[in-house]
Image: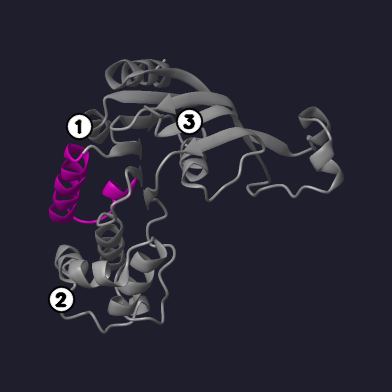
Amino acid sequence: MSAAIEVSGLGVRFRRNRRGRRSFKDLFSGSSRRSRPGEFWALRDVTFSVQPGESIGVVGRNGQGKSTLLRLVAGVLLPDEGAVEVNGGVAPLIEITGGFVGDLTVRENVRLTAGLHGMSRDEVARRYDDIIAFAELAGFEDTPYKHLSNGMKVRLAFSVVSQLDEPILLVDEVLAVGDKAFRDKCYKRIDELLAEGRTLFFVSHNERDLRRFCTRGLYLDRGALVLDGPIVDVLDRYNADYNA
């Protein structure tokens, strides 16, 4: 069986909190010659594979490359070294409210966003009521997106993306947003997706969530993959390093 996600020798670098620009000459020089003052490697020489149906939690302190890795897997960021191969579509619960259009209504945004993720018009129509009900936005369907509260925006985004049939689910701290009742709904929905055999790639600082959803962990530190193993072992190592 092919891996759901295959990462090989992955590296990406930034400059002053943003991607450094490459010249044409840079493309034909070695990585050492391409290095510039002020640049740093957010990730370097990261290699791992994820099998279909696995639940992977990415662990590490802030600024260690976790969200960068997630964006690379999602395909919204390109590596400077190595490769990421994803076999199957992804449902990205990352930067969750991105892609919605402020001047469009809730109804229009549901159709647009679901369509951009590959959902057919008929499928959007069939699932529309469930999306609105989950987001608790009945009565707000003709409201411009920009007039929604932040909580409403997050509920809508999670509701749309979690309805996608993609085999790989990417989650980045979305469960930290919203009230307890909505988080409980999110937990239940993710449980349902995992029961269907979806693959989960999950970045979180919440140890309870990591232990609940994940069986395996990746521990990143200073852009390097320090440990790849059972989530319990990875969290123990991380906590020991963090509290040392």
The mark that comes first in sequence, 3 or 1, is: 3
Q: Which residue is mark 1?
A: 212
Kindly give the residue lying farthest to the right in the view shown.
Answer: 25
Q: State left or right for residue 124 relative to residue 133.
A: right
- Magenta-drawn segment: 173-196
Q: Does residue 74 sit above or below 214 in this rendering?
A: below
Estimate the x, y position of residue 21 in percent, counting from the top left: 75, 50
**Separation of residues labelled 3 and 2 (CA atoms):** 41 Å
Identify the residue at the far bottom of this view.
142
Labels in figure, total: 3
Query: Upstream in the sequence, badge 1 or badge 2?
Result: 2
Judging from the image, what secondary structure is the residue with disc 2 in?
Answer: loop
Q: Amino acid at mark 2?
A: Ala
Specify the quadrant that holds the C terminus.
Answer: top left
**Residue 159 among magenta residues:** no
Does residue 184 show up magenta in the picture?
yes
Q: What residue sits 35% from the left and 24% below the top?
A: 217
Q: Position of residue 19 (x, y in %)?
A: 66, 48
- Given residues 81 and 203, the one toward you in this image is 81
| Residue sitting at x 72%, y 38% | 39
Distance Cα–Cα, label 3 vs label 1: 24 Å
Which of the two discs, 3 and 2, labels the residue nearer the N terminus? 3
Look at mark 3 in the image and give the residue it sits on. Answer: 6
* Disc 1 element: helix
Look at mark 2 in the image and give the residue it sits on.
138
x 23%, y 80%: residue? 141
Viewer-side residue, 117 vs 187: 117
**Is the residue 153 above or below the residue 46 in the image?**
below
**Residue 212 in view:** yes
Dot 3 crowding, Cα within 10 Å, few <14, some 14–19, many 20+:
some
